[in-house]
Amino acid sequence: MAFAPLGELQSTLLAAGAAVVVAVWGYNKWQEFRLRQKAARVFRGEHADLLSDKTENDSPPQVRSEDRIEPVFSLPTTDQDVQPLPPLELADSAIDCLVSLEIAQPLAAPEFWAAQGKLFGSLEVRWIGFAGGQWRQLTAHDAEHYRRLTAVLQLADRGGPLGEAALSKFFFGIGKLAEDFQAMTELPEAQAVLDHARSLDEFCAGVDWRIGINVVSRTGKALTAPGLRRLAGAAELRLRDDGMFHAEDENGQTLFTLASLGGLPVAEDADEVAGVTLSIDVPLVSDGVAAFNRLLAFARELMAAENGALVDDQRAPLNETVLDAIRAKIVEFQEKMAALDIPAGGRRAMRLYS
C-alpha cells in the first residue's frame, strides 16, 4: 500500500469528512421531509372536509388509530419541565377525551385562542394550559404564554355519546394546530375513545331518573296561586329565571323544583293553577332520599292548605307503598353511580347530566 504525503493525506481526510457531514445533513432533511409529508396526508388529505358545515347524516371520514402526528423535534427534559397532572375539575380522563400539545417555544395565548376558534365549530372544546407552575383554563382574555396545552372534549352528556364525526373533527383540528405551531402531539386510539363514550353514555342513561309527583285539588278546583307562593316562601323555595321555585341545599344546589302542573313555569300574575308538579333530578342530588323526604314534607303542607291530593301523571293516588318504592329506587340508582365513581350530585354527575 502506498502512503500519501502528510499534506495530501490531510486534504483527503478533510474532503472525506465534509462528504460525511453533507450526507448526514441530507439524510436528516430527507427524513424531515418524509415526516412532514406524512403529517400533511393525515391532517389535510383524509380529514380536510371536516371543516365544512356537514350534518350528522353525512358520511364522515374514518378515524384510524394510526392517524398520529409524528414528533419532528425533541424537547430537552429538565426539572422545570416536569409538570403535575391537570386537576380533575379541569381535565378528567374518566369523562373527557384529552389531547396535549407540546410546543417548542412559549406561545402567546391570544394567538393560539384565535387559531383554535376557527377549527372546531359547534364542538365544545375546552383548553387548559400549564404556566406559572399551575394549570388553568384558557379564555378569550388570557394573556399568558404556554408551552403545554391540553384540549378537553367531553365524551357524553344527556344529548348522547361523542360520535365518530365529532371525534374526527376534533382530531383534525388538533392536527392542524400541531402543524401550524410546530407542536408535538399524539392522538389516542379512536375506536377506544368511541367505545368509552358509548359505554359511559349507556351507564348514565340507565340511572337517569327525574321523579315528578303532582298535587291537585281533591274537589277538582284550582289551587290558589297566592297561597302557593306564600307556602313556597315559607319553605325557603327560591323563584329562579326558569319560572320554577327551587329548594336548595346550603351550597345553592337544587334539591327539587316546584312548577305548575306538567312542569310549566308558574306565571307571576296567575291567580290560580290547576295543580303543581314537584320534581327531583336524581343524578344531580347528592342525597336523593333526604331530598325526596323534604319534597314530600312540602307537598303535605300544600295538600293541607289547599285540600289537595298526591297523584302521579295519570292522576292515580300515590300511597305510602308507592312512595317507599320510589325511595328504594333512588337508593339503588345512586349506589350504582357511587360504585362507578360518579357520585350523584358530584362534579362528574353535574357535567354528564347537563
Image (cartoon, helix red, strand yellow):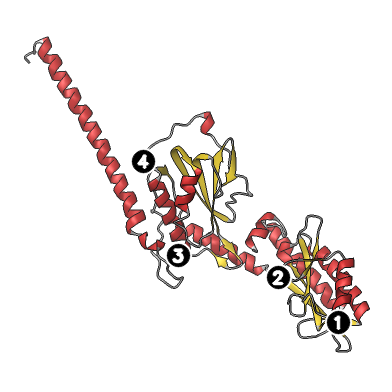
Estimate how packed mark 3 is, as few (under 14), some (14 to 19) or many (20 or more) residues with alpha carbons within 10 Å.
Answer: many
Q: Which residue is mark 2?
A: 209
The residues bearing labels 3 and 4 have C-alpha atoms spaced at a distance of 28 Å
Estimate how packed mark 1 is, as few (under 14), some (14 to 19) or many (20 or more) residues with alpha carbons within 10 Å.
Answer: many
Q: Residue at x 9, y 10 (%)?
A: 5
Among numbered discs 1 and 2, the one appearing first in the sequence: 2
Q: Nearer the viewer, residue 98 or 255?
A: 255
The residues bearing labels 2 and 4 have C-alpha atoms spaced at a distance of 50 Å
Among numbered discs 3 and 1, the one appearing first in the sequence: 3
Which residue is at the far front?
269
Q: Residue at x 79, y 81 (%)?
A: 312
Q: Nearer the viewer, mark 4 or mark 1?
A: 1
Residue 333 can be seen in this image: no
Q: Which residue is mark 4?
A: 72
Q: Amino acid at mark 4?
A: Val
Q: Position of residue 78 (x, y in %)?
A: 50, 29
Q: Position of residue 105 (x, y in %)?
A: 44, 36
Q: Are marks 4 and 1 in contact (CB under 8 Å)?
A: no
Secondary structure beneath dot 4 equals loop
Q: Which mark is residue 223?
A: 1
The residues bearing labels 2 and 3 have C-alpha atoms spaced at a distance of 29 Å
Residue 57 can be seen in this image: yes
